[in-house]
């Protein structure tokens, strides 16, 4: 597995969204972006994390664009969005190649009752307006997640103070 390289362009990835649009990474934008990758509908820890994100979403979107993606089908993503009332941009159908391009850990389902396809383990990517990676957090399992309050506070500090990328050695 190749680790993501902070300070370099994020892999060019286009992911469809449940509302018919797309999330495109690796290209310049007007604002900072935060991408959260979740395991999918089968993961109760993901729901708790994303419900917390949704509850504080306005504080995030005041500063940056926020998108959440998984390898789930459109229907599974829509079902989650409807069930939990999520307001963030929600992408689906993340391919295994895209997962690997982002440096994510990839898991096989433990059984057919868990899910029906490979899926990405959690990740969080802060992306500068120029399309380069500022901060990355990836996990090989569902239990390790960033603290949303700390992460947002740190990102506000990074943005306001134009902090350099760290962890490049």
Image: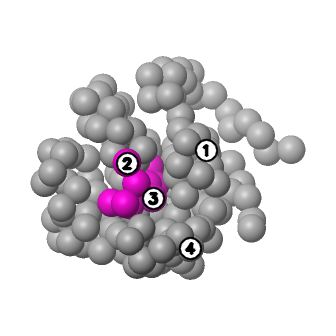
- The image shows residue 36, relative to residue 74, as above or below, that is above
Report the residue marked by disc 1: 137
Write down the region rendered in magenta: 36-44
Q: Are marks 2 and 1 in contact (CB under 8 Å)?
A: no
The mark that comes first in sequence, 4 or 3, is 3
Is 15 positioned to the left or the right of 142 in the image? left
Distance from Cα at disc 4 to Cα at disc 3? 11 Å
Residue shown at 51% from the left, 22% from the top: 150
Distance from Cα at disc 2 to Cα at disc 1? 20 Å
Q: Nearer the viewer, residue 74 or 103?
A: 74
Residue shown at 44% from the left, 22% from the top: 149
Report the residue marked by disc 4: 108
- Tell me if residue 30 can be seen: no
Q: Nearer the viewer, residue 164 or 37?
A: 37
Crowd around label 2: few <14 · some 14–19 · many ≥20 (10 Å):
few
Q: Secondary structure at mark 4?
A: loop
- The image shows residue 141, relative to residue 104, as above or below, that is above
Q: Which numbered mark, 2 or 3, is in the foreground of this view?
A: 2
Report the residue marked by disc 3: 39
The mark that comes first in sequence, 4 or 1, is 4
Is 55 positioned to the left or the right of 36 in the image? left
């Amino acid at each position: 597995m190749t680790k993501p390289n902070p300070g370099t362009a994020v892999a060019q990835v286009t992911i469809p969204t449940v509302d018919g649009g797309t999330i495109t990474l690796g290209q310049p934008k007007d604002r900072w972006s935060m991408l959260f990758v979740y395991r999918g509908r089968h993961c109760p820890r993901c729901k708790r994390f994303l419900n917390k994100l949704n509850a504080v979403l306005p504080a995030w979107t005041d500063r940056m664009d926020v998108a959440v993606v998984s390898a789930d089908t459109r229907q599974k993503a829509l079902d989650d969005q409807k069930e939990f009332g999520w307001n963030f941009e929600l992408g689906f159908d993340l391919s295994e190649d895209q997962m690997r391009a982002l440096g994510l850990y990839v898991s096989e389902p433990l059984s057919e009752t868990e899910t029906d396809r490979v899926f990405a383990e959690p990740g969080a990517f802060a992306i500068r307006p120029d399309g380069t990676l500022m901060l990355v957090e990836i996990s090989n399992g569902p239990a390790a997640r960033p603290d949303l309050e700390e992460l947002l506070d740190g990102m506000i500090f990074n943005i306001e103070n134009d902090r350099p990328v760290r962890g490049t050695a």
